[in-house]
Image (spheres, helix red, strand yellow):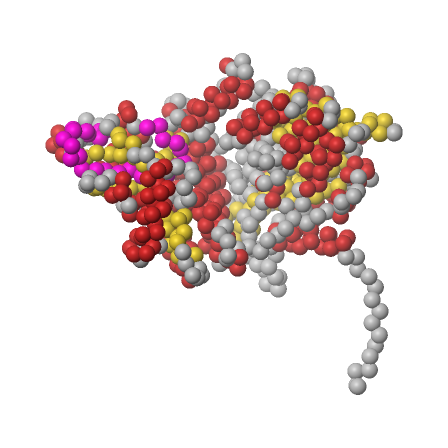
Amino acid sequence: MKKPKSNYLNRELSWLAFNQRVLDQASREAHPLLERVKFLAISAANLNEFFMVRVGGLKMVSDSSSTSSDIAGFSADEQLELIRARVRKMLQTQSKCLLEELEPELELKGIHRLRPNDLSDTQRELLLERFREETLSTLAPIAVQNADDFPMLAGARLCMCVRLKNEIGAQIAPPKRDSELSVDAAAERSADRYLLLPFGRSPSRFWTLPSEKGYRYILFEDVLRLFLAEMFANQEIIESSIFRITRNGDVALVEDRQADLLTGMKDMLDARRISQCVRLEVSDSISDEMIEFLQNAIDVAPCDTYRIEGPLALADYFALSGIKGFSQLQDKPWPPQPSPEFSAGKNIFETIAAGDKLLYHPYQSYEPVISFVAAAASDPDVIAIKQTLYRTSSDSKIVEALETAAANGKHVTAIVELKARFDEARNIKWAKHLENAGVDVIYGVRGLKTHAKMSLVVRRETTGIKRYMHFGTGNYNEATARIYSDVSLFTSDEQLGSDAVHFFNAITGLSVPQAFSKLVAAPINLRETLLKLVKVETESAKNGGSGQITAKINSLVDKDLIDALYAASQAGVKIRLNVRGICCLVPGKKGLSENIKVVSVVDRLLEHARVFYFEHGGDEKLFISSADWMGRNLDRRVELMIPVEESACKSRLLKILRSYFDDNFSAMELQTDGTYQLVVKKKKKGINRTQQMLYEEACQIHAAHTNPRTTVFEPHRNESN
């Protein structure tokens, strides 16, 4: 195998290392037990998307016979080989974690998973009654005679394959490769019949049973296997096994072939449903005969087949992690704290006009962001609202406010990005809702994804037209705003307001963007600006200055930026990077990157904010951004980088940024060989858990406003009495 270039780490293996850090949390006793179950489910859900997107994309490159290689020098085939080996180890770890660690501990805490052999007669009767009422009415067996009539199974859904003895005399043979099967073997197997039982989306995976104490459940597939005879009476069941397929989700829209984007998006969603199978997961108890039947029928290679010990589809365990009545096994709630600046009764526009305001979610409530758009919708002085929407919640109050604004006669423009992967259907629905409400909807920019997060409100005041803005690092999604850490900046800065108008006009008017005063945008000048900022630090260090760069990002992949950081490190610039996920940069390598430190924090909230700091010769520059340091963000997306200049906002954001490098609870440091090690707690130092500290700080900010400290006079007392 070709060795990777020594200066870069492979993107896919770096992502798998990130998912391993998520999975590692499931084994950490520092987390409550059901939160560990949640981490296990998250790691499984992450892996599902990884196969749909990254593996799916690599297989397309492989099938095209492309000779291109990644930043570390690996071809697509080499990467797929490395991925398969690493994933098999990860799946073994997931199974071991569930079966040998979590389930025994859950048993001790009163949460019991029952197997068929554990059931009493009463429990069996209860399950049989429910099975007859629900399952027999919903599941529909599908007979399969050959590969041509194998059904188009939905990806990511469980299915049971049943092999029956053919007692009706029909010669129904399973699909086979003639070169691999002897005539005798084929004749012998022709006596078997195969049927499929695709699981529906509605039945619960976890069937609960009455219990005076604790929580008892049995998995649906165990119930189904227990009562299969109810579905196939008087037929000999030879074997039954659970399997699941994953389809390629990297089906992109070819925009220049589509006259109508909305129609093109719907066609793309249809194509994704019938795309190539990139992974077949099967229970480890499956027979060689059945697995060969499935591989041939689905057209998936043995190397893309994964035998799994224990339950499949561990992402379903999200449901188990949230069961009621076991709060002592779950994280204590961190209710988002109200922000004193945006207290009820205050005019939100007067508040923003008084000075920039910075919030850090979800420690501080996302409600001011919703209130900002809602207030604009009803304020008689507001004449226009312009809004970007990338990923929204299913019951978006922001979308509702935009509809209200249009109904109130305001000029409302929404840039709805239809190409937000796996949220396309939801965004199509919202786009039609908004159009029907009278909102001017723009479906993004041809050839680019609009990933910027900005809301602009134009208001007529006594002094003239004034612009108010919200910039964010996260999506306008009330659901994810409760579990993602992101920055919000509210401002009425005149230059930013002018830039915001030019930004929206360029997108909606198909015009060439005018030069911005303060905003930095991709794909216009974000790459160029970041490289210039790094170069300033490099030149400063070369000339005897200190030079410092601190950044918080989700991914670092772009080769030009990595090379610029290497050059800065060699010049003596001190670089600290908090990279949650993928990092292709090699830190701490002598003569290359010994001045670069990379840490990753994986804890109960998803780190999502992007914050960049440059010392800049003492004229400190601080930015928030929607963009990670990846080629797609810098070249193929519409992104924004916004300066944070107001002194109080700047001071607080710098404190937040630096706190991630003091974490010794969840932080792991990237090593030169691409592995991660938990940051060691220094002697005489307590545990520093950044997320806990940030929540406590938000509580203190709220408490200081609602319960201001008063002076109390305490008299001396005669202690001798």
181 or 522: nearer the eye? 181
Residue 333 x/y as whole percent? 59, 53
Task: Describe residue 578's horizontal placement relative to residue 135 as left or right.
Answer: right
Q: Is residue 93 visible?
A: no
Residue at image location 73% in from the left, 52% down from the top: 701
Q: Residue at x 48, y 36 (%)?
A: 11
User: In the image shown, does 462 or 1 lie closer to the viewer?
Assistant: 462
- Which picture quadrant has residue 245? top left
Position of 217 relative to 531 (above/below) = below
Q: Foreground: 314 or 534?
A: 314
Residue at 29% across, 42% down? 241
Image quadrant containing the N terminus: top left
Q: Percent position (x, y) of residue 173?
A: 19, 29
Residue at the farthest bottom position = 721
User: In this picture, which residue range is highlighted in magenta?
Assistant: 151-176
Asked if residue 411 lies left or right of residue 45, the reply is right
Q: Nearer the viewer, residue 56 or 74?
A: 56
